[in-house]
Image (cartoon, rainbow, N blue to C red):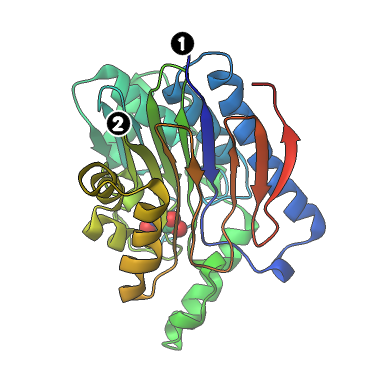
């Protein structure tokens, strides 16, 4: 008998304060979250694979200027975009990732192409761009990713840096990411993540979002996880794999394991952190410790929920 399906997404825990965006901009961000969830649900709800679903969900958010991934991504200290993404199939443990790419329109698609090709897991920099171009993926000039919001954020961060006051920057100015997790009818789990990283980051810095086990992890029978927050800590904790290990070896629930990392381990460093995760029964969680996190999920009963701050709400009921 076919099992339950489920989908959860995040658009980063570097959420803006309510007053930073207009009503129309908030509505556009929420609508992009809804479309992302719909894209994934349209696949798993019709018997498609969780791997296709997470790629589709992340592609929608990469194409939206509301999030720090793809179009609308952060700028590094040299004023360029360097993007990271990865994807993992919980059924086979196959995975793909790209780091510091500058010209691939949808980095998550390149990650998927690497996974499908099967021999390697992660390509970086110019070589990764060249590999994607040869694979026939859509390529764009680096300026395609630029939005005024990110130009302004880079200027603010550089000014604060000059005053030795970088700590005064808001989470929204500093960082963001997008990610998705899904469970399909066959019981397979998958996760995908994509980011522009931190604004004003040094060139060639690699985030957790392209590191399998850190920002992205999926294992059938256990969970799928996509993280957001200061990547260095997620890499040091190997956060995604850590959550799966606590569930598998310690018998913790998804909520216990994810809360343990976000509200326990991360507390030690006082860093903004969040994630979306789903277990083998389709239970989804979206914990975060910042003022807000773009997030959403569809329950196994079809309830599509979207929110940013304390406004998480059922916005649509989908056919199961
Ligand atoms: N994890 C991303 C990074 O370290 C940023 C984020 O998720 O907000 O670049």
Res. 85 visible in picture: no
Ligand 1 placement by image quarter: bottom left
Q: Is residue 196 left or right of residue 309?
A: left
Quadrant containing the C terminus is top right
Label 2 SS: strand
Residue extending farthest to the bottom is 163
Give neighbour class at mark 2: few <14, some 14-19, many 20+ (Cα, 10 Å): many
Residue 35: give x, y in percent of width and height. Answer: 66, 34
Residue 149, by quadrant, is: bottom right
- In this rendered view, identify the residue nearer to me: 177 or 266: 266
Q: Residues within 10 Å of mark 1 (few under 14, many from 20)?
A: few
Picture disc at residue 55 = none
For label 1, the SS is: loop
Q: In this view of the protein, can residue 201 be seen by the observer? A: yes
Q: Nearer the viewer, mark 2 or mark 1?
A: 1
Mark 2 or mark 1: name the one nearer the start of the chain: 1
| Residue 2 drawn above or below residue 234 | above
Residue found at x 64% / y 42%: 33
Q: Quadrant of residue 186?
A: top left
Could you say which disc has been placed on residue 1 in the image? Answer: 1
Residue 216 screen position, x and y as percent: 34, 42
User: Which residue is located at x 59 percent, y 35 percent?
Assistant: 299
Identify residue for label 2. 96
Q: Is residue 152 above or below residue 121?
A: below
Kindly identify the residue that appears in the image at 63 percent across and 30 percent down.
301
Residue 155 position, x and y percent, is 54, 71
Residue 313, position as x, y percentages in the image: 71, 49
């Amino acid at each position: 008998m076919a099992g339950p399906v489920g989908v959860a997404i995040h658009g980063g825990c570097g959420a803006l304060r309510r007053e930073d965006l207009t009503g129309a901009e908030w509505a556009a961000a929420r609508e992009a979250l809804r479309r992302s969830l719909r894209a994934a649900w349209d696949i798993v709800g019709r018997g498609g694979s969780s791997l296709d679903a997470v790629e589709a969900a992340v592609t929608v958010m990469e194409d939206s200027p509301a999030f720090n991934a793809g179009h609308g991504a952060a700028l590094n200290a040299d004023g360029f975009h360097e993007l990271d993404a990865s994807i993992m199939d919980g059924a086979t443990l196959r995975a793909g990732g790209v780091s510091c790419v500058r010209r691939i329109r949808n980095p998550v698609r390149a990650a998927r192409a690497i996974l499908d090709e099967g021999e390697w897991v992660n390509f970086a920099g110019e070589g990764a761009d060249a590999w994607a171009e040869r694979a026939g993926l859509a390529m764009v000039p680096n300026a395609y990713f630029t939005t005024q919001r990110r130009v302004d954020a880079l200027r603010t961060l550089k000014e604060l840096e000059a005053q030795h006051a970088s700590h005064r920057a808001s989470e929204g100015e500093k960082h963001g990411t997008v990610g998705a997790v899904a469970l399909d009818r066959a019981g397979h789990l998958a996760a995908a993540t994509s980011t522009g990283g931190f604004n004003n980051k040094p060139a060639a810095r690699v985030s957790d979002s392209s590191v399998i086990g850190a920002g992205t992890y999926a294992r059938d029978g256990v969970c799928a996880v996509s993280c957001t927050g200061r990547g260095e800590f997620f890499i040091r904790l190997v956060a995604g794999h850590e959550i799966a290990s606590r569930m598998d070896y310690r018998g913790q629930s998804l909520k216990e394991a994810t809360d343990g990392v976000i509200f326990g381990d991360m507390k030690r460093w006082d860093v903004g952190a969040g994630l979306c995760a789903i277990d083998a029964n389709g239970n989804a969680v979206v914990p975060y410790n910042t003022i807000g996190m773009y997030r959403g999920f569809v329950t196994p009963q079809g309830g599509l929920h979207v929110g940013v701050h304390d406004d998480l709400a059922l916005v649509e009921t989908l056919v199961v």
